[in-house]
Image (spheres, helix red, strand yellow):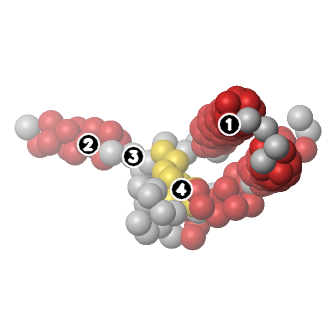
Amino acid sequence: MKNLVVIAAAMLLFSCEQQKLAYVDNNKMLEEYQEKIDIEANFKMKSDKLTQKRDSISQAYQIEAQAFQLRAQKLSDKKAQEEYGLIQQRAQFMGQQLQQEEQSLQMAGRVEMDSMVIKVKKSIGAYGKSKGYSYVFSGGDGGSVIYGPEAADITEEIVKILNDNYKNE
């Protein structure tokens, strides 16, 4: 009976072997990850170009509207209404096109970011597996780690691996 208790205790000790845990500070990682920085910069550049295009079209429309106002005084009411209707249609069409471009840009940005997040998760998983971690948690705002010792923080290693891989793509 005594041997049975010793064997059960030994089995319990072996079954509760120490698991290796780590965490990654998502906020810090994403602030330092070059691909994310590049995606945001590229999106901002495209967004700024779209804003410039919108401003330029708006200016052209205003000039056309002012020119029409001068011409409208010499036109019959019916002819003025027809021309004004055409100008409004063109403006509405251009507004719709710009809105579609903006939506497409936002959708492409989301797809690119989602793809990057998937790649990051795979890289973290591969790193964790290669280093023998049982679990790698996410830290930072919204993460699942409220506190962890600095020794368990693998953020720097992950950022280095991600940036190295990104450079080599």
C-alpha gap between disc 3 and disc 1: 90 Å
Task: Tell me the quadrant of the picture where the C terminus can be found.
Answer: top right
Image marks 1 and 4: residues in contact by CB distance under 8 Å: no
Find disc 2 in the rendering and name its residue. Answer: 12
Find disc 4 in the rendering and name its residue. Answer: 23
Q: Which of 163 and 45 is in front in this view?
A: 45
Q: Which mark is residue 17?
A: 3
Whether residue 89 is visible, yes or no, is no
Kindly identify the residue that appears in the image at 15 percent across and 36 percent down: 4
N-terminal-most mark, 3 or 4: 3
N-terminal-most mark, 1 or 4: 4
Q: Residue 97 at x, y = what percent?
A: 72, 31
C-alpha gap between disc 3 and disc 4: 20 Å
**In the structure shown, which secondary structural element does the residue marked by tag 2 occupy?**
helix
Find disc 1 in the rendering and name its residue. Answer: 77
The three-letter code of the residue at mark 4 reads: Tyr
Q: Residue 107 at x, y = what percent?
A: 64, 34
N-terminal-most mark, 1 or 2: 2
Q: Which of 119 and 76 is in front in this view?
A: 76
Q: Nearer the viewer, mark 4 or mark 2?
A: 4
Q: Which of marks 1 and 2 is in front?
A: 1
The three-letter code of the residue at mark 2 reads: Leu
C-alpha gap between disc 1 and disc 4: 73 Å
Q: Which residue lies furthest to the left in this view?
A: 1
Kindly identify the residue that appears in the image at 52 percent across and 48 percent down: 136
